Amino acid sequence: MRADARDNRARIMTAADEVFGRSPNASTDDVAKLAGVGIATVFRHFPTKVELLEAVLTLRLERLRDRAIELADSNQPGAAFFGFFTQVVSESASKLAIAEALTAAGTAAGVDAKKAGSELRAAFDTLLTRAQEDGAVRRDAGLAEVYALLIGASRGATAVGLEPKVRDRMLGLIFDGLRP
Amino acid sequence: MRADARDNRARIMTAADEVFGRSPNASTDDVAKLAGVGIATVFRHFPTKVELLEAVLTLRLERLRDRAIELADSNQPGAAFFGFFTQVVSESASKLAIAEALTAAGTAAGVDAKKAGSELRAAFDTLLTRAQEDGAVRRDAGLAEVYALLIGASRGATAVGLEPKVRDRMLGLIFDGLRP
DNA sequence: GGGTAAACGAAGTAATGACTCCGAATATAC
DNA sequence: GTATATTCGGAGTCATTACTTCGTTTACCC
C-alpha cells in the first residue's frame, strides 16, 4: 500500500468518526469533504457505506473494550466498575455514536464489529464480577440486565440533551440500585 | 369537512401510527399503501411529512398522558407509579415509536406535541410526588432524573431486542434504586 | 531523473423519496 | 335526479445520495 493511500485511509476514518458521531445518517459526501479527499477515494477504501459505518463502529467498540480491560486490573474493583459506567454514559451524552455503537453491536453488524462487541461485553463482565466479589455491587445482578442498564442510560443521556447535574443524579439512582 | 375526508384522515393516522411504529424513517408511500389511499390524499391532510410525524407523535404522547392521569387517582400511589413505569418501558420494547416519542417531545416538535409532552411530564410528576408522599419512592429523587431514567430504560429496551425476563430484572434494579 | 503502476478527484448515473398537477369520481344541496 | 364543489389517486417533478467512470496526478523503483 502506498504511503498516500494509508494516509488518506486514516484521514477518512477520523472524519467518519467525527461526522457520524454528530449525525448517524450523514452522507458520504460529508465525510469526504471533512477528510479533504474526493468522494471516490472514500469508496475506494470502503466499497460501501455500510462497510465504512462498520469500520467506525468497530473502532469505537475497540476503544471502549481497551479501556474496560485496562480498568480490570485495578485494585479498587468497585471504583473501576462505577467509573467505567459513568465514563461511558458521560461520553455518550456528547458523542451520539457511542450509544449507537453499543446498541448496534448486538443487533446487526458484521464480523469485525461483532467480535469487538462481544469482547467489550466480556471485559465489562469482568469489571462487574470483580466489583461483586469486592462487595461493591450486589451479587444477584446479572450481566444481561446491568449491560441493558448501561445501554439504556447511554441512550437516554444521548437522546435528551441531559444536563450534567441531572445525568449524575440519574447515575446516582442507578448505582444505589446496584449496591448490595 | 366531507364524511369521506374525515374517514380517510382517520385511516391515515392509524396507518402512520403503525408504520412509523415499526420504522421511524419509513416513506410516505408506505403509509398511503397501508391506509389504502393515494399518496396525494396523505399530503392533502398533512402538508408535509413532518406534520404527519408530529400528529402521530402527539397522539402517542396524549395516550400516555391520559393513562398517567388515570393512575394519578389510585389509592395505591406506589403501585401506580411503578406500574406506569413498567408499562411504558414494556411497550417501548415492542413499539419503537413510544421511546422515540418520549425523546422527541423534549427536543424538536411543534406546538401540539410540545403541549402534550409537557402535560405528560406534569402527569408523571404527579405520580412521582404521590408515590413519594406514600413512602414508596425516596424523597430526594427529582423529576428530572427519574424522567431521564424512564426515557433511558425505554430507549434501552427498544434498541436492543431485550428479552422480557432481562427487562424485568433491569426494572427491578432501577426500582430498588428508587426506593427509600 | 524517467517510467510505470497505483491512487486521486470531478463529473457522471440510477434509485429513492418528498411533494405537485390534473382529470376522474363522489358526496352533498336543491 | 342533477349540478357543483370537494375529494380522490396516479403520473409526474425535483432534490438527494449511494456508487462508477475515466482522464490526471503522484509516489515509488531503477
Image: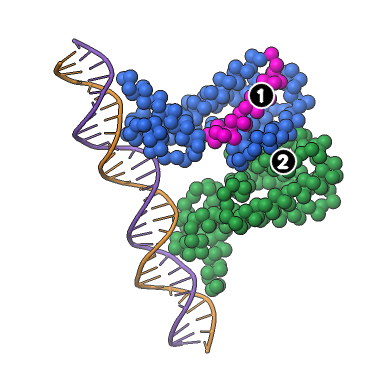
Chain colours: A green, B blue, C purple, D orange
A43 to the left or right of D14 = right
**Horizontal and vertical percent position of residue B177:** 75, 31
The answer to whether tags 1 and 2 share a subunit is no
Percent position of residue B2, x then y: 31, 20
Q: Quadrant of residue A159?
A: top right
Q: Quadrant of residue C19?
A: top left
Q: CA distance from mark 1 to mark 2?
A: 21 Å
The crowd level at tag 1 (other Cα within 10 Å; few <14, some 14-19, many 20+) is few
Q: Which labelled disc corresponds to residue A140?
A: none
Residue type at mark 1: give it: Gly
Q: Nearer the viewer, residue B119 or A142?
A: A142
> The residue marked by circle 2 belongs to what chain?
A
On-image quarter of the N terminus of chain B: top left
Residue where numbered disc 2 is placed: A146
Seen in the picture, residue A43 relative to B70 is either above or below; the reply is below
Q: Is residue D30 above or below residue A76?
A: below
Indicate left or right for A155 with A172 as reference: left
Q: Which residue is labeled 1 in the image?
A: B83
In the image, which residues are magenta? B75-100
